[in-house]
Image: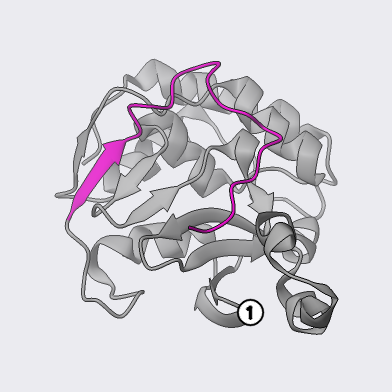
Amino acid sequence: MITTMADRDCVNLAESVNPVLDGHDRNRLPAARVTARTLRDRLARMWPGVSVSGTGGVVAAADIAAFARKHGTPLPGALAELYVRAGVGTFGGFLHFEAPDGMCTHRELIEDLIDEDDEEDLAPTADVIVFARSDNRDMCGWHAADLAAGADRVVLLDGFDEEPLAGSTREFLDSLPDTDYFGFGVLAPTYRRHDWLQPGERSADQCTPPV
């Protein structure tokens, strides 16, 4: 069970996420609103046996709101819950999650690495908002069009190739500890918060291309 932050953070998340969601069509996002009790119940069931370490990766209400302002849609609630409860970090020493205010589209991440001949290949995944990247240069994300429609299916990008990973962010996170998503076996049950990522030290406008 994740136990790195107090229950008051669940209250803070509910208070910070719901105003963001209120700016969108509630008819399309009927299940998105959260309460402190809902967060406590869900987080009590998330990632049993996964150890959490590190002191950075702090996510504030302003970071969640920055995602919505940049992309025109709320950050999926399951990832917002994880970030407020456990911070932005790396799972299994392999999958590196992105801060919500710094998430970029596939196009933004690689636009300096491609030319006009690549546009046709990029088009199907150009709008994918990347929320995590692996040591193997795979990217996990959502199509912006899906988020705008109230869905949050997770896809895997390998270069210009796309594969479905999970039907929702919550499904992906819940199954991450015991599913071989990346072809290297199940990842180690660890989550290390990004110690280098402290409040005020991130840039919402900088998209770093794959190394």
In screen coordinates, is 2 left or right of 59?
left
- Looking at the image, which is closer to me, 56 or 12? 56
- Indicate whether residue 201 is drawn in magenta: yes
User: Looking at the picture, how far across and down is residue 72, in whole percent?
Assistant: 82, 44
Please give the residue where the numbered disc 1 appears in the rendered image. Answer: 160
- Looking at the image, which is closer to me, 82 or 18? 82
Residue 151 seen in render: no
User: Looking at the picture, how far across and down is residue 103, in whole percent?
Assistant: 62, 45
Identity, as a three-letter code, of the amino acid under mark 1: Phe
Query: Image height check: is 29 above or below 69?
Result: below
Range of magenta residues:
189-211
The residue drawn where x is 43% and y is 20% is 9
Figure quadrant of the N terminus: top left
The residue drawn where x is 48% and y is 58% is 211
- Indicate whether residue 22 is drawn in magenta: no
Residue 203, quarter of the rendered image: top right
In screen coordinates, is 196 left or right of 201?
left
- Looking at the image, which is closer to me, 111 or 21? 111
Render colour scheme:
one colour
Q: Main secondary structure of the magenta part?
A: loop
The residue drawn where x is 28% and y is 72% is 179
Query: Image height check: is 66 above or below 139?
Result: above
User: Looking at the picture, how far across and down is residue 182, in whole percent?
Assistant: 35, 75
Tag 1, which secondary structure? loop
User: Looking at the picture, how far across and down is residue 36, in whole percent?
Assistant: 48, 27
The residue drawn where x is 25% and y is 61% is 177
Residue 41, quarter of the rendered image: top left
